[in-house]
Image: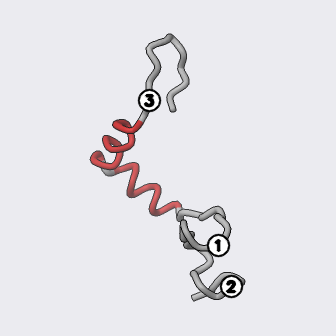
Amino acid sequence: MEVNSSGLAPVDEQLALIGEPAPVRIPAAEWTAWLADESVRAHYRAKLYRASSNSDCWF
């Protein structure tokens, strides 16, 4: 297992309260599994903010 320069966390893992935030690469297989899971998609849709305007922007 590789570790970051501080030696505290694996390179592909981000700890929110320790050190500077860094981008994390999520493997394509994980995205594929999440997108195929209806409960994950429903959870995501429940978190979207849809303004009452005709705008296509959702936050």
* Residue at 60%, 64% in the rendered image: 24
Q: Where is residue 20 in the image (x, y as percent from the top left)?
A: 67, 68
The numbered mark at residue 49 is 3
Label 3, secondary structure: give it.
loop
Label 1, secondary structure: give it.
loop
Q: Which of 58 and 41 is in front in this view?
A: 58
> Looking at the picture, does residue 52 appear above or below residue 19?
above
* Residue at 62%, 77% in the rendered image: 11
Between the residue at mark 1 and the residue at mark 3, the CA separation in whole angstroms equals: 30 Å
User: Residue placed farthest to the left in the image?
Assistant: 39
Q: Position of residue 42 (x, y in %)?
A: 31, 41
Mark 2 residue type: Ser
Residue bearing mark 2:
6
Q: Where is residue 31 in the image (x, y as percent from the top left)?
A: 47, 56
> Looking at the picture, does residue 43 appear above or below residue 5?
above
Marks 1 and 3, the one that precedes in the sequence: 1
Mark 3 residue type: Tyr
Between the residue at mark 2 and the residue at mark 3, the CA separation in whole angstroms equals: 38 Å
The numbered mark at residue 19 is 1
41 sits left or right of 6 in the view: left
> Looking at the picture, does residue 54 appear above or below residue 4?
above
Marks 1 and 2, the one that precedes in the sequence: 2
Between the residue at mark 1 and the residue at mark 2, the CA separation in whole angstroms equals: 9 Å
* Residue at 54%, 63% in the rendered image: 26
Marks 2 and 3, the one that precedes in the sequence: 2
